[in-house]
Amino acid sequence: MRAQVRAHPDPDLTLAEHAALWREDHQAASPSTLIRRFQALGLTRKKDAGRQ
């Protein structure tokens, strides 16, 4: 996961977009699984309030 975030540093990527990128090389993961992985690795994602 850490390598994926480094490879795709765009802070506006949604969890769904990260999940799609993850599925390209790994077994499918739900957004809640990704949230837990981000938290376990100490990774944070900035949110763009204007992009809702």
Image: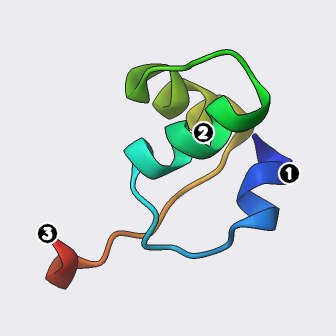
What residue is pinned by disc 1?
3
Which residue is found at the position 67% from the left and 44% from the top? 42
30 relative to 39, above or below = above
**Which mark is first along the chain, 2 or 3?**
2
Which residue is found at the position 44% from the left and 21% from the top? 30
Q: Secondary structure at mark 1?
A: helix
Front-lying residue, 47 or 30: 30
Badge 3 crowding class, 10 Å Cα cut-off, few under 14, some 14 to 19, many 20 or more, is few
Front-lying residue, 47 or 7: 7
Measured in 3D between alpha carbons, the distance from the residue under mark 1 to the one under mark 2, in whole angstroms, is 12 Å
Q: Are marks 1 and 3 in contact (CB under 8 Å)?
A: no
Task: Locate residue 21, reporting x and y percent.
Answer: 62, 45
Which residue is found at the position 16% from the left and 84% from the top? 50
Quarter that holds the N terminus: top right
Please identify, in this view, whether the residue under mark 1 or under mark 2 is nearer the observer: 1
Task: Locate residue 32, reporting x and y percent.
Answer: 40, 23
Q: Amino acid at mark 2?
A: Phe
Q: Tell me the tag on residue 38.
A: 2
What residue is pinned by disc 3?
52
Residue 20 relative to residue 8: left or right: left
45 relative to 19, above or below = below
